[in-house]
Amino acid sequence: MTTTLATTVLDLDGPGYENLSRRMHEEQYRLVSVWASEDHRNIRVFSAYMNGVNLVIGRFSVPGTEQTFPSIASLFPAASRMERTIRDLWGWRPANAHDLRPWLDHGLWKHPPLSGESPPASNSPDTPPSADYAFIPVEGVGVHEIPVGPVHAGLIEPGHFRFQVVGEKVLRLEERLGYTHKGIERLWQGSSLEKAIKLAGRISGDTTVGHALAFSRAVESARGHRVPLRGQYLRALLLERERIANHLGDLGALANDAGLGFGLSQFIILKEGFLRQNRTIFGHRLLMDQILPGGVVTNPDPESVATMISEGEALLEQIRVLETIINEHGGLQDRFFGTGILTPEAAQEWGLCGFVGRASGQKTDLRTSCPEPPFDTIAVNRGVDTGGDVRARVAIRFFEVIESLRLQRLILESLPEGAISETTGTTGGEGEGVGLVEGWRGEILCWVHLGEGEKILAAHAHDPSTILWPALEWAVPGNLVADFPLINKSFNLSYSGQDG
Amino acid sequence: MHHVLLHILKTGIVTGETPRLTEDLAQQAELLARKGFGRFGHTLSIRHVDAGSCNGCEAEISMMSGPCYMLEHLGFRFVASPRHADLLLVTGPVSRHMKEALLATWEAMPHPKIVVSTGDCALDGGLFKSSYAVEGGVSSVIPVDVHIPGCPPDPESLIRGLLTAVGG
């Protein structure tokens, strides 16, 4: 059985692009991302599907006379928002799409901002915002609406939630996002590799390692570069450290949202110690700018390696104590159990990935399905739960943080000697490449179109939040409004990652 | 329950020393204190607004409230409504889509109000400068009293910035 990623890229016409989606649906592939690009006056729409080790990318060159591309949202519902994004940014319409409401466009743009014909001035005067977003209404006796956001009560990112409620029960939740849209794809166009990798590390600050790694892998696949083994091991180490830090913070916040402040305090102490270690060893608490095309930046000395191993052991002990306390806390379990259920059927239909998918019975984990070094020799244990509730997501997060600590120890103990990076050089022709990473939230895909030398012609980054946000809408109905923060935290999706 | 209490006792107090202001920050603090901002003393309410950040700043801001820094023991607390806030802590390059919400939040605050911008992109847009989707820094939308540099600033820098804003 082959375990390395097998990428197939197909150049298709309109009907071919549509047929591919049908074939992928029949063969039970899941959708990873849909995106578009425009270069050399060539307009293209991409869709990427995945099943096991197979990554299939369909590329459709939109004929110059047409402004439409086939929608695949009827088979892959998660495609809808990505297709609406393409329409907002480029002005090309997904034909036969059910939902044509704007998504990232909040009514401030005169022209589609990525369309080559009318490059937008950065400070063009605001046009009056278009009419309110057309939320889907729910009618009936006693139904009322609760609008929340974009500015929330807590320390979180901005986005709008519209709840349709009867009494205390949520009938329907609809999200309105795009508030943190920064135009990263436009900034990438024509930028140098040096600036581009910095931007990749700031698509979503809590996933800086994941996005920088996906971007670097895309560049390496476009240029055919190989990363030295020690560099690959250190990349895996950084990725696991990012996973550990995020799960620690979220587990604390989840306990706090259910009323146990003790949990937050304890996990924040653990996370703080971990971040300080990051700064001591790698020079940055969140591990920003640690990964470059060709390898990594920091080479930890044997002393640092030993420190990380002993730190990991101490952390593991603490986490096990807290896990027991949380699992035995009746009040917490009462809030976690049966709250915010996302059924395995819904998770499969939406092609969910990451720990949210794994808490709803989906077995996808790129570290096990197509392992790259060091995971070709170090086997990753994958946790799966079929409950789909907050309890399941908490359990999977505990499982993963403990597993990541085990992986960290194994990586550090078998760290090969040698160089940590290979100079990629500034020479090289035009080419395209794809990078895939199992980030802490799920699958990150990055596609890069490199020009001659060091210039980026176009690039696209796909944050798993894009696929997971619609799933939150499915997990909330039937729950109390007061349970929303808890359910939301159990997902903890990135606004910035989805907004781009 | 006894596990919880035992663990709290075992943990003890982990709060570090309050970071000291550097000389230039102390000077800035004195200027601001003369403007009248010093009156907030040790009870100050903060409203945080993410104006399009990558969420890196949020990750560090939320660490400030933890036991290692104990922002509350310095007299600061986060509030949910801008109407209860003395200080607006803004992150992000100010995306065009957040400009209106940022302005509305600022306007809803009672006078006198302090604005602290946080992170390199909040200064002038940073890496996102010149994007069609970005205004280009907090001060291009509302008046800023103190800026905290860093990408993202660590909790010590954040605390120093907040102390500067209230006159040291």
Image: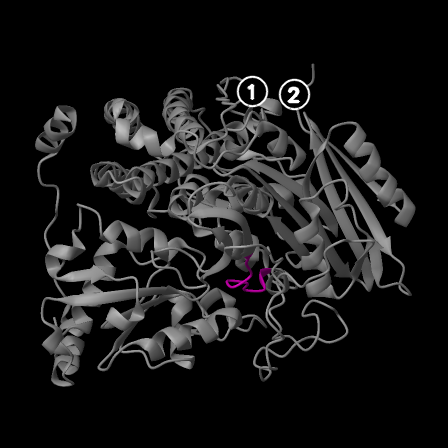
Q: Quadrant of the N terminus of chain B?
A: top left
Label 2 chain ID: A
Residue B41, percent from left and from top: 9, 71
Near-viewer residue (A135 or A363): A135
Q: Is residue A474 left or right of residue A278?
A: right
Question: Which residue is the site of mark 2?
Answer: A3
A180 in the magenta segment:
yes
Locate residue A124: give its quadrant: bottom right
What's the magenta region?
A: A176-184
Residue, far top: A1
**Quadrant (top left, top right, bottom left, bottom right) of the C terminus of chain B:** bottom left
Q: Is residue A242 above or below residue A121?
A: above
- Determine contact: label 1, label 2, CB under 8 Å: yes
Visible residue check, residue A479:
yes
Q: Position of residue A287 (x, y in %)?
A: 39, 45
Residue labelled with disc 1: A376
